[in-house]
Each structure stands twice: as structure tokens, then as C-alpha cells.
Image (cartoon, rainbow, N blue to C red):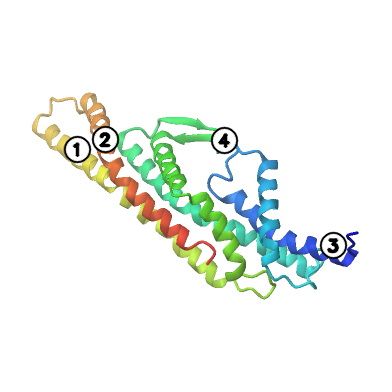
Amino acid sequence: MLQFTDTQLLGWITAWFWPFCRIAALFAAAPIFQDRGIPQPAKIGLAALIAALVSPQINVSPTLVIFSWDGMLLLSQQLIIGTAIGFTMRLAFAATELAGNLVGTQMGLGFAMFFDPEHNAQTPIVGSLLGYLALLIFLSMNGHLIMIAAVTESFHTLPISVDTKLALGWYTLALQGGTILSSGFHLALPVLSTLLLTNVALGVLTRAAPQLNVFSIGFPLTLLIGIGALTLAIPYMGPLMERYLMDSIQHLGH
């Protein structure tokens, strides 16, 4: 007959609880997993299953009690680490959506919004288009599986201990956040350059023929050229998006 004591049961629950907190925080912040279309019980169940699989491979001090000051500190630490890993992956998507918003604004589609049920808000249509393109690339790379592998690997690079130092991780995360603007402009640069030349040409045309109503032809011309430039640029954006996603993946768990 299988027998175990209360101390053993408490030790098993404690060893499972800390990985569960980190993985659950990742699912709350990471792309795809934080989608409202995925039921909350499914997320919790998947986090519990992964935590049960990885907990035997993790060294957790048996003196760590959940309901203690050190336990509360450790709980906050696990939530922060899991959220930071998920947020790191969100940075590449934020850069892509920023590029789409810049292009849409210059094309004259800044007012073109649609309701995004994921964020429960109105979002620019061009930014959402590029965001979904990045999501498809992310899935084709098995990025969701790589994230799960990264969070399990993080238990070795950032062990479950109150002595774990997170200063270097915050510095790396801050550097990654600083790349959103540069990456977004890098993606949008070909289309923005084309639209800039179009606006310059329209300005020269207006000076050469003042009687020409630039407002009647400027908007449709800019929109048409912007759509054409975006259509030609999207195949070249894919490899750049993949590179940004790979950069984010390389920083997961560090």
C-alpha cells in the first residue's frame, strides 16, 4: 500500500507550486497564450501539467514555505520572471505593429480602424495586418513551443531561490525594449520612403500647376501608391520579422 506523510505531500506541492506560478505568468503575458480566445481553464490546466512535468528536474529547497515572507517574495519573483519572458516575445510584435501604424498613417488610413476582440479596443487596420503576419510567422517557427522550452530552461539559468539576482535580466529587457522604435522604422522604411517621394512629387506638381486641386487627387494617389508599395514590401518584411522574433527568442530566460 502506498503511504506518504503530510511532510512529503507538502514538499511535493511546494516543488510544483513555484514552477506553476512562473509558467502561468508566462501564459498571461506571452503572445498566442494570452489570447482571450483560449479559455482560462485550458491555460491553467496546461500550466499545471507543464509544471508537474518539470518539477522533478528542479532543485527546490524544502525549507521554502509558501505562506511565509520568503514565500511571498519568491512568489513575486516567479511572477515577474514569467511575465518578463512573455513580454520579451511581445516586443517583436510591438515593433511590427508600430511599422504598420506608421505606414497606415502616411497612407491616409490612420482613421481606418476595426474592433479587435483580443484587446477589446479599436486598432489600426494596417498595424493589425502586419501583426497577424508576424503571428503566422511565429507559429510557422514553432515559437509557442520554443517559449515553453525557454521557460523550462529558465529554471536552470534563474533558479527558484530568494538569492536569485534579476538585475542583469532587467537590463537586457530594457535594451530589448529600446529596439522597438528602430525595428519598427526599419520595417516601415521602404513604404515610408515611397510615400515621402510621392508627397514631394505632389508638392512640386502643386507649385508647377497652382490651379490643380491637390486635395482631390492627393489622397487617392497616396493611398494607391501606398497599397502598391506595401504589397511589394510584405514579401521582404517576412525575413525581417523572422529575424526580430529570433532575436527575442534568444533573449528568453536570460
Secondary structure of the residue carrying tag 3 is: helix
Contact between marks 3 and 4 (CB within 8 A): the answer is: no
**In the depicted view, which residue is nearer to us: 213 or 233?**
233
Tell which circle, 3 or 4, labels the residue nearer the N-terminal end.
3
Secondary structure of the residue carrying tag 4 is: loop
Q: Which mark is residue 226?
A: 2
Q: Amino acid at mark 1?
A: Thr
Mark 1 vs mark 3, CA separation in Å: 70 Å
Residue that label 3 marks:
9
Q: Which mark is residue 120?
A: 4
Q: Amino acid at mark 3?
A: Leu
Residue 14 picture location, percent across and down? 78, 63
Residue that label 1 marks:
198
From the viewer's perspective, tell me whether residue 2 is left or right of residue 16: right
Mark 2 vs mark 3, CA separation in Å: 63 Å
**In the depicted view, which residue is nearer to us: 204 or 134?**
134
Q: Nearer the viewer, mark 2 or mark 3?
A: 3
Secondary structure of the residue carrying tag 2 is: helix
Q: Quadrant of residue 244?
A: bottom left
Q: How would you rate the neighbour count of disc 2 (Cα within 10 Å): few for under 14, some for 14-19, many for 20 or more? A: many
Tell which circle, 1 or 3, labels the residue nearer the N-terminal end.
3
Residue 174 picture location, percent across and down? 48, 63
Q: Is residue 177 visible?
A: no
